[in-house]
Image (cartoon, rainbow, N blue to C red):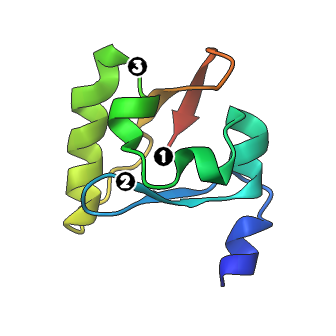
Amino acid sequence: YSRLIDTANAPIFGVDTQCAVNIWNQSAIQLVGYSTEEVMGKNLVKEFITDEFKTAVQAVLDQALHGDETANFQFPLMTKAGVRLEVLL
């Protein structure tokens, strides 16, 4: 399944229980500008989310890791070029 994730037309990223990035596909690379090597193991919230959304994004990720889904949650992700990109979960 890792090949399907990596070659998907949509950006796909995943985090572990510590919010460290553990999945970052080719579409995410193209959209955000960071290579897999640059993001793997980094804390998604601390490193790539704007300050005003860190608490909200952390809460949504914590809920997801406990099996509670959140639909249509929009948050800003910062690209390597410093551009704020709106992401919809």
Q: Circle 2 sits in a helix, a strand or a loop, which is it?
A: loop
Q: Which of marks 2 and 3 is in front?
A: 2
- Per the rendering, the mark at residue 50 is 3
> Is there CB contact under 8 Å for labels 3 and 1?
no
Residue 44 location in percent, x, y? 41, 42
Mark 3 closeness class: few <14, some 14–19, many ≥20 residues within 10 Å: some
Residue 19 location in percent, x, y? 31, 52
Q: Please, is residue 43 above or below residue 76 in the view?
A: below
Which residue: 41% across, 32% down? Answer: 47
Residue 40 location in percent, x, y? 51, 54
Q: Please, is residue 29 above or below residue 7 in the view?
A: above
Report the amino acid beneath label 1. Leu
Lower position in the chain sequence, tag 2 or tag 1:
2
Q: Distance between the residues labelled 2 and 3?
A: 16 Å
- Per the rendering, the mark at residue 89 is 1
Q: Nearer the viewer, mark 2 or mark 1?
A: 2
Residue at the spot of label 2: 20
Report the amino acid beneath label 2. Ala
Mark 1 closeness class: few <14, some 14–19, many ≥20 residues within 10 Å: few
Which residue: 77% across, 64% down? Answer: 8
Which residue: 72% across, 45% down? Answer: 29
Mark 2 closeness class: few <14, some 14–19, many ≥20 residues within 10 Å: some
Lower position in the chain sequence, tag 3 or tag 1:
3
Look at the image and tell me in which quarter the N terminus lies.
bottom right
Q: How far apart are marks 3 and 1 (CA)?
A: 16 Å
Report the amino acid beneath label 3. Thr
